Image (cartoon, helix red, strand yellow):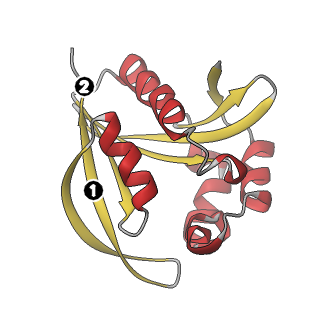
Amino acid sequence: MYILKKMTQTQAEDIASNWHYNDEYSFYDMDADEEDLVEFLDPNKRKESTFAVMNGQDIIGYFCFNRVDKGTIDIGLGLKPNLTGNGRGMEFLRVGLDFAKVTYNPDHITLSVAAFNQRAIKVYKKAGFKEVETFMQTTNGGCFEFLKMTYPCVR
């Protein structure tokens, strides 16, 4: 059973230093973008919006929840590198969606994903996310295409 707990500084530092993804997914390494890394490691910027996903004593991922407007929560997420590509994405995503619904009571949950990451996009679509738009974003030393997706929260 997964539990979300406010991320500690030690957990943030561990993720930033030790979580490295393989091949093209190294795009998601925390140190791939200096600005993102600084924000992730600053407890004042993480505030109350970043949570470690725990399986017992082990951190298996994280979620960041940011209120866009009264009815929308935007999420960022990361699954521990050695757990990716093994069919665990849906269960992990569901835990974050359920937490967001209970905690923030949004009308919609949105996320943005690199367009090349078809593995994640497949999971998001299966969970009920719909494509909204594509956009270009400068990050990680280049300009990349992203897909914005939205999930309607049924009340």
Image quarter for residue 69?
top left
Foreground pick, 16 / 148? 148
Q: Residue at x 73, y 36 (%)?
A: 59
Foreground pick, 153 / 23? 23
Question: Which x, y percent locates residue 25?
Answer: 57, 67
Identify residue type, mark 1: Lys
Identify residue type, mark 2: Cys
Question: Which x, y percent locates residue 81?
Answer: 68, 54
Foreground pick, 60 / 91? 91
Outermost residue on the left side: it is 132
Q: Which residue is drawn at 64% across and 41% down?
A: 61
The correct choice, above or below, for 42 with respect to 56 in the image is below
Question: Which x, y percent locates residue 144?
Answer: 38, 78
Image quarter for residue 112?
bottom left
**Label 1: few (<14), some or many (≥20) within 10 Å?**
some
Outermost residue on the front side: it is 86
Q: What element carries label 2?
A: loop
Q: Is mark 1 on a helix, strand or loop?
A: strand
Q: Do the residues labelled 2 and 1 touch (CB within 8 Å)?
A: no
Instruction: Report the Cα–Cα distance between label 2 and label 1.
Output: 16 Å
Residue topped by disc 2: 153
**Label 2: few (<14), some or many (≥20) within 10 Å?**
some
Give the left or right position of residue 28, taking residue 102 as reference. right
Give the left or right position of residue 17, taking residue 148 as reference. right
The correct choice, above or below, for 103 with respect to 72 in the image is above
Image quarter for residue 75?
top left
Q: Which of marks 2 and 1 is nearer the N terminus?
A: 1
Q: Residue at x 67, y 37 (%)?
A: 7
Q: Residue at x 61, y 55 (%)?
A: 40
The correct choice, above or below, for 101 with respect to 114 in the image is above
Task: Check residue 148 in the rendering and tell me which mark sits there, or answer none.
Answer: 1
